[in-house]
Image: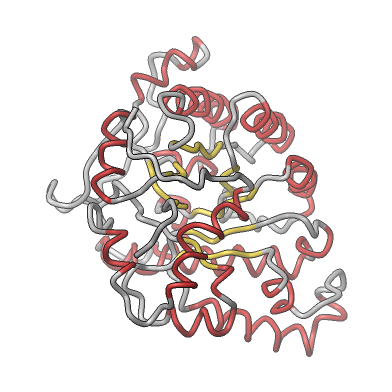
Amino acid sequence: MQQYPIIDADAHVVEAVAGMRKFLKEEYQARPIWTNHSWDMDFGGTLGKHNDKPQVQLADMDADGIDMQVIFPSRGLSLNFEKQTQLAVNVACAYNDWLAEFCSVNPRRLKGVGLVALQDVDAAIKEARRAVEELGHIAIMMPTNVKDQDIGRKEFWPFYEEIERLGVGLALHGGTRMAERMHGRFETFISVHTIAFPFECMTALTGLMFAGVPEVFPKLRFAALEAGCGWVPYLVDRMDEEFEKRGSREAPLLKLKPSEYFKRGQFYVTFELEERMLPYVIERLGADKILFSSDYPHWDTEWPNAVKTFLSRDDVSAAAKRQILYDNPQRFYGFSADTERRPETT
């Protein structure tokens, strides 16, 4: 029987455009701010739910047995694909203000992740600082690409330097629209969603690694979210092999094998709740690198049975479950949870 608070390291809110508008510049008040698509993600309204109310979020956490929830956007996942840079910058600021207001209903249980527009690196640095130091968000969401550009490029290094100074985690989270390079050939969402998130995370981590980012910024923490975990040992092995033969010339900043940066705790990953590869990933990487995610309230969430589904697994030890549900998210996100579970919703 678990006796510790359960922390959901990757959940979402469906951000309310109407609520965000009061935080936007006047020139953006009456115009569309999100790029739309026509994918039937919720399968005709039969999967997931749409929620932009903190009281509902808290009640739904109680229904699933979740004590604390780290909250990411929904529409904003592909903000760094937006071609209108100044719009993206202002939307990120408005979203962060709106999310701070959302989380203020119960800041002990609702933990916001700040959004930045890396189309303008200087603005992203400024906004990350504001999101963490003024608004109280506990991490920054990192896109897997910026307008299809490799996030290992040195133009983004001043941003990494600031995140390292702030001491918060960088949460790599893909988005369907920003993964067009991966899934543009497909005509069904089942194919799009199968490929988009894991392949984008693989590509992003490869770029970060061989650019030397984990070596140059040794205190920086990354998490690859909502992409499963079974691919990670394969990718790490493949990067090690490539580095052994070509690293001296093409990845000269790395002083260790890629696998060693994973082992020393700079990279974390979530998993699908019934993913059969999870025990193997724990064996290879360690349970201390794994985070629990409900993906509430999206179409593929197991809510209100996400916690129950994971706790019922007999192929993961009780000690590993505690690390995944409680210890690891605190270490990655850099906050301390209360030791006593509190069931209140407000």
Q: How many badges with numbers are in the image?
A: 0
Q: Is residue 277 placed above or below 143 in the rendered structure?
A: below
Q: Is residue 267 placed above or below 338 in the rendered structure?
A: below
Image coloring type: secondary structure
Left or right? Give the position of 82 relative to 183.
right
Camera-nearest residue between 98 and 303? 303
Estimate the x, y position of residue 318 in percent, counting from the top left: 43, 73
**Quarter containing the N terminus:** bottom left
Camera-nearest residue between 60 and 194? 60
Left or right? Give the position of 160 relative to 180.
right
Camera-nearest residue between 7 and 26? 7
Q: Which residue is drawn at 81% across and 77% down?
A: 256
Estimate the x, y position of residue 103 in percent, counting from the top left: 45, 29
Q: Which residue is drawn at 49% across and 16% down?
A: 23
Q: Is residue 120 placed above or below 286 in the rendered structure?
A: above
Estimate the x, y position of residue 25 in percent, counting from the top left: 52, 14
Q: Is residue 224 placed above or below 330 in the rendered structure?
A: below
Estimate the x, y position of residue 30 in percent, counting from the top left: 38, 14
**Quarter containing the C terminus:** top left
Q: Which residue is drawn at 37% across and 82% down?
A: 315
Q: Which residue is drawn at 32% across and 49% down?
A: 296
Left or right? Give the position of 254 relative to 238.
right
